[in-house]
Image: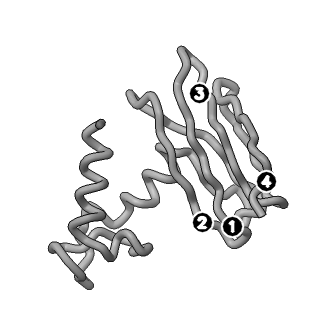
Amino acid sequence: MPLYHLLIATLFIANPDNAVGALHWGEGFGPSAQAQLCGSNVNWLLTSYVLGIRPSRPGFAEAIIDPRPGDLTPAKGEVATPQGLIRVEWRRKAEIIEAIVEAPKGIRLLTPNPKTRLIMKEPLR
């Protein structure tokens, strides 16, 4: 298991507030109203850049799928939108990133990186 998976799993187990949609990591272990300064954007950064799911129009009417993997080879996750979940699972194959994507009907998906290949699953209802 990669270190970042272990770190994220440990933080979610240690602070259950994070598992239910908190916008920051708490300062301590357990419920906390104090935001830990360096962790206030980690959820957004992981979904926006590691998974590569970002809105390109208000309300996720259009989304960009553009993973920035660094040294990672696979990643999997989902982002909640007003229309429902966008799920992405990508894997690096040589210089290409293959991304299996599930998205609600009505969300237009773009991929600006020619080295990212989208494989669409049936639209989610």
Q: Which residue is mark 4?
A: 123
Q: Nearer the viewer, mark 4 or mark 3?
A: 4
As drawn, which residue projects farthest toward the left? 28
Residue 106, image x, y percentages: 84, 60
The quadrant of the rendering that contains the C terminus is bottom right
Q: CA distance from mark 3 to mark 2?
A: 22 Å
Q: CA distance from mark 4 to mark 2?
A: 15 Å
The quadrant of the rendering that contains the N terminus is top left
The type of residue carrying mark 2 is Ala
The mark that comes first in sequence, 4 or 1, is 1
Q: Which residue is mark 1?
A: 84
> In which image quadrant can residue 80 be found?
bottom right
Q: Which residue is mark 3?
A: 97
The colour scheme is: one colour
The mark that comes first in sequence, 3 or 2, is 2
Residue 30, image x, y percentages: 20, 77
Q: Residues within 10 Å of mark 3 (few under 14, many from 20)?
A: many
Q: Which residue is mark 2?
A: 80
- Asked if residue 36 is positioned above or below residue 90 in the image, the reply reads below
Q: Looking at the image, do the residues carrying marks 2 and 1 touch, with CB atoms under 8 Å apart?
A: yes
The mark that comes first in sequence, 4 or 3, is 3
The type of residue carrying mark 3 is Ile
- Which residue is found at the position 65% from the left and 67% from the top? 81
Residue 116, image x, y percentages: 65, 29
> In which image quadrant can residue 25 be found?
bottom left
The type of residue carrying mark 4 is Pro
As drawn, which residue projects farthest toward the right? 106
